[in-house]
Image: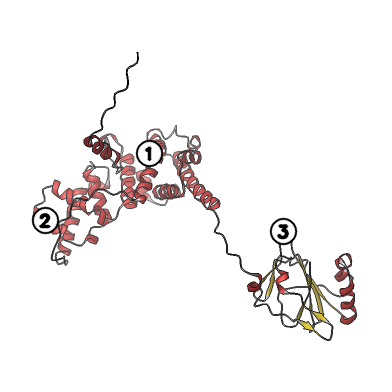
Amino acid sequence: MAKAAVKTRVTKKQVAEHRSKAQKDLSPKWDGHETWDSNQFYRHFRLSMDYYRLEFSGKDLKPKVINWMSANGYTKDQIKAFKDTKDNRCNLTMGAIAANLLRGMPPVRADFNEGRNTAQWLGSAITKVIEEGKDDERDEETVEAKPAVPQISIQERVREATFAMTEEIEDALESFSKEPEAFDPKAFKLLNLLRGKQAKAAHARIIKDFYQRQHDEYIELQEGKCDQLKEAYSHLSKAQVKKIVLFYHEILSACDMLMQEAKVNRKPRAKKSKPAEKIVEKLKYLKQDEKLKLVSINPTDIIGAKELWVFNVKTRKLGKYVTGEFNELGVKGTSITGYDEIRSVQKTLRKPEEQLKEFKAAGKVALRKFLEDIKAVDIKLNGRINEDTILLKIS
């Protein structure tokens, strides 16, 4: 006989531990840097700097510099002097270097940055900030801040989700670093991969920004104009560089595709319909002509029509506006819109009284060839309507 399942009570401690595990630290690690070659080390350094550049400001990273000072023998007075300077004096490079050193980046490596000591550079930068900021004004009363509960913003959640989507991309780049000759950029269907991860336009934008700089660097290497890049990537052949450029291009193209799809699929903003009377209110036309016994139609009837006949009493020109197959006539200001510029023509009438009388009596079939039967030169209509123009007929 099966035993009934025993319900266990979840303690507050277990909940707290679970929440702390959920708040992952996504900042770059330096584990195993001892086994990296110069190219791997340089590439990881650039990616880590890009990460901090995209995710934080110098102000955000100032606590990292303070933590590094505490871990490296600075006195309380020195730390306080740095802490009391204005936040904008701590630039992004300082903060990112301090964060990397705290995460295990070695301060000195013979084949990186010509063997210079990164920790010494950071120390000099800190000294300069303290010296330049010693007269910075501070609030007279400083309220001791209570430890705030970490609040993850929507942007941070999006970034967190985004970097989780790039695991396969990072694995592919790692495989290129290890075996560039065997690497096949065409084997990775990056667009399908990102779609499978449910990547949206916001994710695609972050991914593109993250990989854009490295793509540009390989393009510059491929062009062969930078001696420093040639030396850094001297272990790669031209064919291998071509492979990795193609791979980065596929990353950026997949991101562009996702962003473009989002634009296409976005529900268009509903346009507020404008009353026809409002559309034609600026249209200038002749309402009637007593001599020729002509009266204009209501201009609002032009909206949506396929054909419009007009007559200019001053120039004696009879014209016909015709639309394309999928268009409709419209009005904008004092002009007719939506007409076919090739098929819409006008002709001068020699005997307007007689010919207009025939026009009025003509049916639909007769009107089709009415303009063609007039022996005069075709003149293209320009869409303009003025005070001498009678709006004869629409269809």
Q: Residues within 10 Å of mark 2 (few under 14, many from 20)?
A: some
* Residue occupying image coordinates x 13% and y 66%: 140
Sooner in the amino-acid sequence: mark 2 or mark 1: 2
Position of residue 266 in the picture relative to residue 165 (left or right): right
Query: Distance between the Cα atoms at labels 2 and 1?
Result: 44 Å
Please name the amino acid that badge 3 sits on.
Phe
Q: Secondary structure at mark 1?
A: loop
| Circle 2 residue | 78
| Vertical relation: 337 (above or below) 217 | below
Sooner in the amino-acid sequence: mark 1 or mark 3: 1
Q: Secondary structure at mark 2?
A: helix
| Circle 1 residue | 235
* Residue occupying image coordinates x 80% and y 84%: 289
| Circle 3 residue | 326
User: Residue 308: which quarter of the image?
Assistant: bottom right
Where's residue 20, x and y in %? 25, 40
Where's residue 54, x and y in %? 34, 51
Query: Distance between the Cα atoms at labels 2 and 3?
Result: 76 Å
Please name the amino acid that badge 1 sits on.
His
Q: Residues within 10 Å of mark 1 (few under 14, many from 20)?
A: few
User: Residue 369: which quarter of the image?
Assistant: bottom right
| Vertical relation: 94 (above or below) 188 | below
